Image: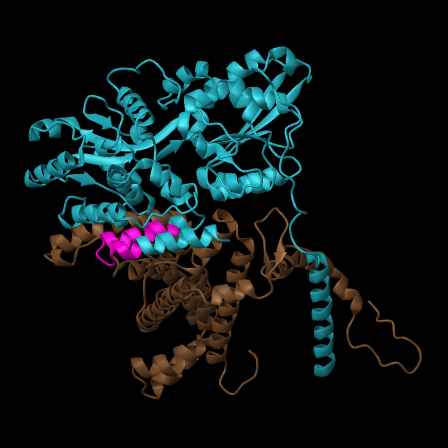
């Protein structure tokens, strides 16, 4: 297609506006179903609204209320703990596995990849119910502990004030590990074999090889995995809702739980929107930090 | 090239933002102020087939909770027989789905003609405030509902602007009674040589005896957080007058929950937990799992709602008793989900006929046949099942202290305040006086808004 150049001294256009027309359908969809609701949510957060009747403008009152709410800060704190379980632990575990796989030939790797990925694609309700059974007072975990003589450790993991939060975290680790593993394995397979050979010729042992060759090459995958897992940790709703409903007491509350209650149960849609906006800002801040920390050394976008 | 691309991207971003803002519309969200629903077509007697026939052929759209299916499967054919020109189109929703969507559905252009709601501020209050449901005083009078409901009709009454409940017009009608009571294992009680305990003292003694005999005295599953609150009602109902609790829940001026008898009730329950009378790990067990365990033979007592009789159904092994005599058999309870008629319906007579039929004395036997407890008096149910016990218990409670409603009706945030706090007190992480202060503060904040 010839780019029509306008006559006269106008500057020559470097790109073709006509091509952007192909983007219009997808763009329209994106604006209507993604951008508009986001903007609308931010807008609603400035009102006191029950979802149906007339609303009243309250300016920053909802935001002030949310930021001053001890409940919400406690929930945000729990979300931070979930980042450790949903993102950091699976990443480290997956990297350990990768380090081992890089050295040892594993038979049936394709099968393991598929099997370990299954938790991630399972419905979260199924996951929650299955783990509720595992953690139950007379469930498999306690039975196993008792049978090897560690009965003193057995307890109702999800019902105990001290262990409820880590227990829900462990569920998250189990779900997210497969994602990290699959991403890193495909990253590993993309590393040219020459790099490993060169490292070995230079006399690198397994640890040196891991930190000099494998880890830097996986930087992109690690970034993707962390972003996905951190977002999941901060947005977490289904697993908490279906295991502990935020209990016992308030030991496993998360911001999404309050968004749900405010929007659908107590009908304070403005306040729910304010919490949602605050949560979004938090997620963006954390993800931006992660991307900054994991970018290519020497600057420049990847 | 770099520079031009950036400015191109910026232009695109600006266009996008503008498009999004325009679409969002910069006006205040929500409709205009809503007028209270008015009744312009009051009926004076039960709706006749001739009256409905005048509407011509029509479809009546109905939304109902999933638990109504057994009952509706019998009622709808009877209704369509009585009013041949009407076809009923019913949609069932799970409880959570219904609560989350009913408000918006009733506000939409094609709102259902008839729907179930839920007593309390979150659902019925919002529906009344937005003028979405029709007052049903004329319907209640026409079908003799008020006599059957008695004092408990207050749970269905709202002021016209939805700002207070417990008095005003009747906005919903519900045919069945739900209550918390004591399920007991007959064989185990007999083995312990005990009668069914009907006073708090007797109950304490029974729990202690069960523990000594190596049984789990009381089965509890509280991962939903609501169950412990319902169990508490048995003790609280025995120590504090039911009328006081109901007054507090419906927001009567000056009512307070922070009284010594309530502190005693919470401490008493906490005492059961610390004495080891309650099944271990209850905060991590779901109520369904707990009920299943009890129905399979675990434990001596289970305190829960009469709706669990679907699972704990064997009348030979299990029995059901109302609350404790000390408080007039009061415990948490209320009518089931109320039925409402849309204020925007164009088939109001047909809708009124439907709701009237569901709540009439004639349909009470149909309700009993699917093991739900009607508020109208019915003949004793099928022997061998636990159902006759349910009927006796319901009558005992309604005739004496009456139901306590549900504590979380008191304010729209009370569920979290009460249940989380109770978990903490029972787990030894807080004191009952702190909990009562929090509960009363929540109530006060809500009622000064």
Residue situated in front as seen by the camera: A302 or B324? B324
Horizontal side of residue B272 vs B363, given as left or right: left
Please indicate, yes or no, whether residue B336 appears anywhere in the rendered image: yes
Residue B318: name its quadrant. top left
Residue B390 location, x and y as percent? Answer: 29, 24
- Looking at the image, the residue that sits furthest to the right is A8
Q: Quadrant of residue B319?
A: top left
**Residue B300 locus on image (x, y percent):** 16, 34
* Residue occupying image coordinates x 43% and y 20%: B147
Question: Could you say which is closer to the camera, residue B163 or residue B343?
Answer: B163
Choose between B286 and B203: the one closer to the eye: B203
Q: Residue at x 56, y 28 (%)?
A: B62
Q: Quadrant of the N terminus of chain A?
A: bottom right
Splitting the image into 4 quarters, where does residue B323 fall?
Answer: top left
Q: Colour of chain A?
A: brown
* Percent coordinates x, y for residue A220 in the rendering: 48, 74
Coloring basis for residues:
by chain
Specify whether residue A122 is in view.
no
* Residue span colored magenta: B416-435
Predominant SS along the magenta part: helix
Q: Nearer the viewer, residue B352 or B240?
A: B240
> Looking at the rendering, in which quadrant would you find the C terminus of chain A?
bottom right
Which residue of the protein is positioned furthest toward the front in this rendering?
A: B254
Asked if residue B329 is positioned above or below residue B269 in the image, the reply reads above
Q: Is residue B295 left or right of residue B45?
A: left
Q: Position of residue A97 (x, y in %)?
A: 32, 68
Image hue for chain B: cyan
The image shows residue B308, relative to residue A211, as above or below, that is above
């Amino acid at each position: 297609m010839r780019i029509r150049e306008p006559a006269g001294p106008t500057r020559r256009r470097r790109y073709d506006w006509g091509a952007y027309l192909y983007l219009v359908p997808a763009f329209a969809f994106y604006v209507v179903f993604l951008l508009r609701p986001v903007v609308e949510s931010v807008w609603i957060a400035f009102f006191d609204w029950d979802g149906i009747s007339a609303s009243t403008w309250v300016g920053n009152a909802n935001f002030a209320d949310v930021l001053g709410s001890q409940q919400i800060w406690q929930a945000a704190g729990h979300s931070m703990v979930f980042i450790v379980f949903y993102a950091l632990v699976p990443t480290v575990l997956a990297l350990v596995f990768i380090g081992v796989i890089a050295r040892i030939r594993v038979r049936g790797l394709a099968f393991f990849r598929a099997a370990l990925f299954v938790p991630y694609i399972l419905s979260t309700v199924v996951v929650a119910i299955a783990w509720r059974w595992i953690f139950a007072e007379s469930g498999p975990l306690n039975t196993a502990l008792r049978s090897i003589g560690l009965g003193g450790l057995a307890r109702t993991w999800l019902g105990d004030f001290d262990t409820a939060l880590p227990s829900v975290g462990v569920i998250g680790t189990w779900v997210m590990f497969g994602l990290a593993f699959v991403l890193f394995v495909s990253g590993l397979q993309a590393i040219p074999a020459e790099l490993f050979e060169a490292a070995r010729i230079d006399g690198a042992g397994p640890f040196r090889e891991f930190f000099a060759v494998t880890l830097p090459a996986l930087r992109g995958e690690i970034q993707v995995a962390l972003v996905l897992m951190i977002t999941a940790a901060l947005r977490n709703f289904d697993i908490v809702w279906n295991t502990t409903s935020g209990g016992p007491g308030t030991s496993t509350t998360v911001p999404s739980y309050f968004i749900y209650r405010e929007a659908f149960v107590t009908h304070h849609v403005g306040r729910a929107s304010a919490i949602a906006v605050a949560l979004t800002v938090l997620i963006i801040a954390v993800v931006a930090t992660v991307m900054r920390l994991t970018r290519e050394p020497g600057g420049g976008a990847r | 090239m770099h520079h031009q691309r950036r400015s191109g991207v910026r232009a695109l971003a600006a266009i996008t933002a503008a498009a999004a803002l325009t679409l969002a519309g910069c006006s205040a969200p929500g409709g205009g102020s809503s007028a209270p629903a008015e009744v312009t077509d009051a009926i004076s007697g039960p709706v006749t087939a001739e009256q409905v026939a005048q509407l011509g052929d029509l479809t009546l759209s109905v939304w109902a909770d999933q638990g109504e299916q057994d009952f509706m499967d019998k009622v709808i054919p009877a209704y369509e027989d009585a009013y041949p020109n009407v076809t009923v189109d019913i949609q069932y929703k799970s409880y959570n789905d219904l609560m989350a969507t009913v408000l918006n559905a009733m506000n939409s252009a094609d709102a259902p003609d008839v729907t179930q709601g839920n007593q309390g501020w979150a659902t019925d209050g919002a529906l009344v405030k937005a003028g979405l449901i029709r007052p049903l005083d004329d319907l209640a009078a026409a079908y003799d509902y008020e006599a059957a409901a008695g004092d408990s009709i207050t749970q269905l009454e709202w002021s016209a602007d939805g700002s207070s409940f417990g008095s005003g017009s009747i906005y919903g009608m519900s045919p069945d009674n739900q209550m918390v009571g004591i399920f007991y294992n007959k064989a185990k009680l007999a083995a312990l040589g005990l009668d069914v305990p009907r006073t708090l003292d007797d109950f304490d003694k029974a729990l202690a005896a069960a523990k000594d005999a190596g049984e789990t005295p009381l089965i509890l599953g509280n991962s939903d957080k609501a169950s412990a609150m319902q169990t508490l009602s048995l003790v609280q109902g025995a120590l504090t007058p039911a009328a006081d609790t109901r007054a507090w829940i419906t927001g009567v001026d000056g009512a307070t929950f922070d009284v010594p008898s309530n502190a005693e009730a919470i401490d008493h329950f906490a005492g059961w937990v610390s004495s080891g009378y309650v099944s271990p790990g209850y905060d991590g067990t779901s109520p369904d799992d707990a009920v299943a365990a009890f129905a399979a033979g675990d434990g001596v007592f289970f305190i829960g709602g009469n709706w669990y009789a679907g699972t704990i159904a064997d009348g030979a092994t299990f029995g059901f008793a109302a609350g404790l005599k000390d408080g007039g058999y009061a415990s948490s309870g209320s009518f089931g989900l109320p039925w409402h008629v849309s204020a925007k319906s164009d088939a109001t007579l047909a809708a009124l006929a439907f709701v009237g039929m569901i709540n009439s004395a004639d349909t009470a036997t149909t309700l009993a046949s699917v093991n739900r407890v009607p508020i109208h008096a019915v003949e004793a149910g099928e022997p061998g099942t636990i159902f006759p016990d349910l009927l006796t218990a319901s009558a005992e409670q309604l005739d004496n202290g009456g139901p306590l409603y549900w504590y979380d009706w008191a304010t729209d945030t009370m569920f979290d305040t009460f249940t989380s706090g109770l978990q903490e007190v029972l787990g030894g992480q807080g004191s009952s006086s702190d909990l009562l202060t929090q509960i009363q503060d929540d109530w006060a904040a809500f009622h000064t808004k």
